[in-house]
Image (tube, grey):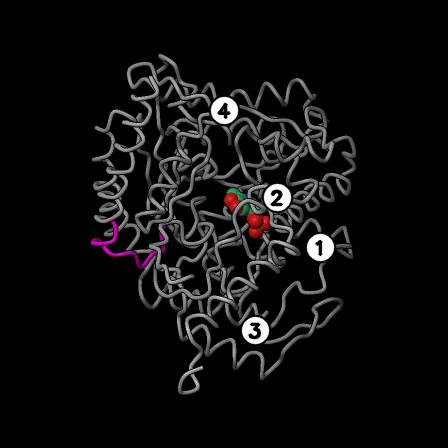
Amino acid sequence: MTDGQPTQETIQAHLTALQGLDQKHHMHPFTDPNTLKQAPPFLIDSAEGCYVSGQGIRLLDMMAGLACVNIGYGNPEMAETAAIAYKTLSYYHSFAAVSNPAVAALCGKIASLAPANFNSVFLSNSGSEANETAIKVAHMYWQLKGKKSKRVIIARDNSYHGSSIVTAALTGNKAMQEPFGIEVGQDIRHAMMPCWFRLGGDMALDEFGIKAAQSIEEQILEAGPDNVAAFIGEPIQNALGAVIPPETYWPEVQRICKKYDVLLILDEVVTGFGRAGAWFMAEEYNIKPDIITLAKGLSSAYVPIAATIVSDEIASFLEANAGVIQHGFTTSAHPVTCAIALKNIEILEREKLVERVRDHIGPYFKQRLKILESHPLVGEVRSIGLMAGIELVKDKANREQYPLEGMVCNHVSQSALMKGLIVRPAGNALILCPPFIVSEQEIDLTVQALNECLSDTYQALQQMG
Ligand SMILES: Cc1ncc(COP(=O)(O)O)c(C=O)c1O
């Protein structure tokens, strides 16, 4: 210590001790423990605006955490709101006929922003819980209708719906199912994802949109329409980077769900609250779902909170027939998380951040990222609002991909990290979902850095032959 301040050695020793504790005791999600044995975890200890910092390094976070810190990090109003909320009512549950002002106000606010026929809100703590709740609501609905065979849920390849048992099964990724012996193919089935770039071949976009939607119909027919409860899909799939469906896709999905009496669950965990430039993509795409799920952007991940909102038709049917919804969590509708979510929405509205994404920074992001399409390693740049996917290819002409074992995308994202930039590798795509407050200059820096990283990777690949 000098003048009461810790020395560099003390700080380093403290950091090393914490890394040791983390290595020894922290079971990380989605992380190979061997990687952690080889290198200690990177400790991020502060964040502000679009930047996260740790170990003396500051990084521009073009992923907003996990596509969730929409208003940016370290907003002082959020901290003040949290302090007041904790002092006022640190907890009470909402089981039975109890509520509190923050919960009531938040549910009212969500209903006022959601599509007009969505007025019933069930609160939980994560996107997984919101989707799990949606599936339970769908099952309950059909049980009460006397159509007890309607149990099958159809999701899509490469979707992401969460990591509980049911939502991991819905998620179109075998790596999240096989280690746990989760079986899919019967009660949970997967249709094609509407990604023209990967699956469209020589088809026109519109034609492919219909084909992708009809793969849902094929699953319904295979399972038997009397056995199918619901289809669940994200309006724009984020797991492979902004998979924006062709215009023909959602109208056809809607037609199919209606034809076979299959509920439509729209997973707006990523897109809800403005990421794609609209408060809800349901309205933007003119989708008429039965249930909508929300999480990340609801509180900008300042606290864990999620919501399942239910159409008036379903809500009034359940009310008339069900009595009790036998479902809920100790911290569902927590007064502090609700107060913080309300403040987050107030900031989004007051600062006109959704309009900023739609009218200004989203179009700028799109225009600048598009430049990367001329790079020999880039097959396609997709973006809408502040969600983007950059597809890396071996051969631009026929859209051939690199084998996943080559980890080409990881090479690019690692070299971006060396330049102080966080982007997310997902198979052969890079994902970018920056905070809504990202500046033009930060976007320019990102494009320049990514261009250099792509060239480094390309050169390395050329040398390897
Ligand atoms: C579209 C979508 N749905 C659901 C989830 C699950 O949310 P959570 O991780 O909060 O459980 C995610 C998480 O990334 C997501 O992207």
**Does the residue at mark 3 contact the one at mark 1 (Cβ under 8 Å)?**
no
Which label number is shown at residue 102?
Answer: 3
Q: Inspect this view and state whether residue 344 appears.
A: yes
Tell me if the residue at label 2 has its CB under 8 Å from ligand 1.
Answer: no
User: In this figure, which residue is indicated by the disc labeled 4?
Assistant: 213
Is 158 or 99 nearer to us in this picture?
Answer: 158
On the rendered image, what quadrant is the C terminus found in?
A: top left
Label 2, secondary structure: give it: helix
User: In this figure, which residue is indicated by the disc labeled 1?
Assistant: 319
Tell me if the residue at label 4 has its CB under 8 Å from ligand 1.
Answer: no
Q: Name which residue type carries label 3.
A: Ala
Q: Which of marks 3 and 1 is nearer the N terminus?
A: 3
Q: Earlier in the sequence, mark 3 or mark 2?
A: 2
Tell me if the residue at label 3 has its CB under 8 Å from ligand 1.
Answer: no
For marks 4 and 1, give the CA distance: 32 Å
Residue drawn at 46 percent across, 35 percent down = 426
Residue drawn at 47 percent across, 26 percent down = 252
Residue 260: percent from the left, percent from the top? Answer: 62, 26
**Does the residue at mark 3 contact the one at mark 4 (Cβ under 8 Å)?**
no
Is 368 or 427 nearer to us in this picture?
Answer: 427
Label 4, secondary structure: give it: helix
Q: Is residue 127 left or right of residue 444?
A: right
